[in-house]
Image (cartoon, rainbow, N blue to C red):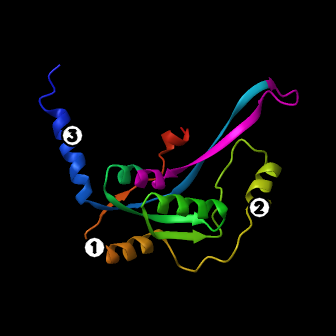
Amino acid sequence: MNDDGFIERAFAYIERFRDCRLLVVGDIMLDEYIWGNVGRISPEAPVPVVAVTRDTRALGGAANVALNIACLGAGVTVAGFVGADPAGREIVRMLRKRGIGVSGVVADPDRSVFEIPMLESDERRQVLVDWNPLARPVPHGIMVHHLFEAEAERTPDAVAVIVPPPSSAQMGSN
């Protein structure tokens, strides 16, 4: 197979990332993975009962895009909203640990876990309300485009990477 220097060109492009400074704007998420073993099926419902052995969390959404860009060597800042809750603080801590700028991240107490479709409404309330209380009111009038404009003023040479919302096909709608 003849690649006509493809590998060398690819590495040359990756090397150029070190000179880039990017801004990622989008939905900042925290992905949680629960690991365990299924020992039986629940008699109350046809669902597996998992004996959880560990759980892990990873940057998701726009935060994951920013992480991937940072891994390629570019300087990157992320802009968007997180909850004013432990998960939001964990996201900011994880971003900082990886050298990703967080000047565009706003902690909004009205944002927390968006949807957990596998839970019934009373269980969802326990996760969303009982375990995730709102700490303070969100400042009036802050919107994502305001964050974008402020970051553009701070870093006028940065290139914006916008993570679009999922399409209806991705969401499973017809």
Q: Is residue 170 above or below residue 109?
A: above
| Numbered disc 1: secondary structure | loop
Which corner quadrant of the image does residue 111 belong to? Answer: bottom right
Q: Is residue 114 above or below residue 149?
A: above
The residue identified by callout 1 is 156
- Mark 1 residue crowding within 10 angstroms, few (<14) / some (14–19) / many (20+): few
Say which amino acid is labelled 3: Ala
The residue identified by callout 3 is 10
Kindly report the distance in space between the C-alpha atoms of the residues bearing marks 3 and 2.
Answer: 48 Å
| Numbered disc 2: secondary structure | helix
Instruction: Identify the residue at the far front of this view.
Output: 97
Q: Are marks 3 and 2 in contact (CB under 8 Å)?
A: no
Instruction: Identify the residue at the far left of this view.
Output: 4
Kindly report the distance in space between the C-alpha atoms of the residues bearing marks 1 and 2.
Answer: 40 Å
Residue at point 74%, 37% (across, down) = 52
Q: Earlier in the sequence, mark 3 or mark 2?
A: 3
Q: Which numbered disc covers residue 95?
A: none
Q: Is residue 122 above or below residue 155?
A: above
Q: Which numbered disc covers residue 129?
A: 2
Q: Earlier in the sequence, mark 1 or mark 3?
A: 3
Say which amino acid is labelled 1: Pro
| Numbered disc 3: secondary structure | helix
Q: Earlier in the sequence, mark 1 or mark 2?
A: 2
The residue mark sitting in front, 1 or 3, is 3
**Extent of the magenta region:** 40-67
- Mark 2 residue crowding within 10 angstroms, few (<14) / some (14–19) / many (20+): few
Residue at point 66%, 51% (across, down) = 115
The residue mark sitting in front, 3 or 2, is 3
Which corner quadrant of the image does residue 42 belong to? Answer: top right
Say which amino acid is labelled 2: Val
Left or right placement of residue 2 versus residue 131 in this view? left
Instruction: Identify the residue at the far right of this view.
Output: 44
